[in-house]
Image (tube, rainbow, N blue to C red):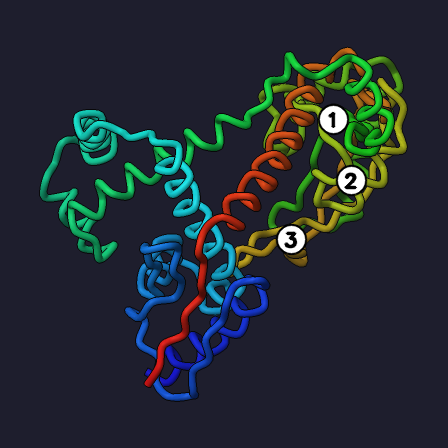
Amino acid sequence: MGKINSFFKHLLLIVGGFLSGYQLLSADDNLIEINRIAAKVNNQIVTWGEIKRAMEQLNFTESEMRERAPDFINGKVDRLLASYAFDQKGMFIPDSFIEQEFNKRMINEFNADRRLFRDHLRSLGKTEKEYRDDIREEIEYQHMLSSSRRLKEDISPAKVEEFYKKNSYMFKTNAKIRIREIVLKPIADEPITVLMQQAAKISNQLKGGKKFEELAKTVGQSTYRENGGDWGVMISEQEVRSEEIKKIAFSLKEGEISEPFLVDLLERKPDGSVAKSGKKAVYIVQVSERESSGIKSLESLRSEIEEMIARELEADSQRRWLSRVKNDAYVRLILPEK
């Protein structure tokens, strides 16, 4: 119980700072019950309990709850404000429409299983009526936001070009290569010197005109042996964990083959991390394809940039709209008394 109290005391301090401009009522350091009112929008309330349950559904840690609580509260307040604006415009959603949406969710999300649905409600601490109210609130919120939505067709070519020039760093591409490998690993504590001698013979065969993929299929212990040592994908430096392979492979030109080199083999630890295993292997690699780094062309990005600009304009429009609604509504953050 002490941990819960400590968490919510800290939570209230965060929210108090986050929602500047809202009227804040003080409370002493006594126990804070999580089912008390946290915020009020006109005649609608938000409780600490529903905020905490929403975060628990996402398996947040206590520190993540402290960090994200203001976002959850502000998001809930915004949805209540949208419902308020929806009502102010004289709009309404027929109960029959809510029923249709409810039945659709019962089928899509719960496979029409009422017991599964009741278990879900129990985990949320909600009644079926509250669940239907949430559906109504969500529909109203999305409707009000869509009224300020900007379509990418409304974005001028000049606006797209300006965005491309100002944000060119977002469209950089890294150099990528496609690798083939021949790998020689020790068998029965075989000395590395013996492997290096074997690798030198293979290297001479390659220099003599033997095809890399043919040798890769017949010698060594590569995971990709059946595919002629081909890794199968283009990769950037960031995608190669082995420092030795990264250094050698990215120094080669397209079609070029490396000299034999030693690699510290990696392994996955029980905690999921990757580290050196203490074992070594001898590698010979070939870069079969290479793509240089650069910046994607404007034409290849035009549609994507139009969508990015539209999202920015939409978000800005929504923020200004919510700000106007807040000025017309009564919003208060309430801390529980004794």
3D distance between C-alphas at marks 3 and 2: 23 Å
User: Mark 1 and mark 2 in contact (Cβ < 8 Å)?
Assistant: yes
**Is residue 159 left or right of 308 when viewed as pictured?**
right
Q: Of callouts 2 and 1, which one flags the residue occurring earlier in the amino acid sequence?
A: 1
The secondary element bearing badge 2 is classed as helix
User: Mark 1 and mark 3 in contact (Cβ < 8 Å)?
Assistant: no
Residue in the image at 36% along x and 77% along y? 336
Q: Of callouts 3 and 1, which one flags the residue occurring earlier in the amino acid sequence?
A: 1
* Residue on which the image places disc 2: 245
The secondary element bearing badge 3 is classed as loop
Question: Which mark is in front, 3 or 2?
Answer: 2
Q: Position of residue 288 (x, y in %)?
A: 78, 19
Residue in the image at 20% along x and 36% along y? 110
3D distance between C-alphas at marks 2 and 1: 10 Å
Mark 2 crowd level (few <14, some 14–19, many ≥20, 10 Å Cα): many
**Is residue 103 left or right of 45 when viewed as pictured?**
left
3D distance between C-alphas at marks 3 and 1: 28 Å
Query: Which residue is at the front of the view, 128 or 248?
Result: 128
* Residue on which the image places disc 3: 189
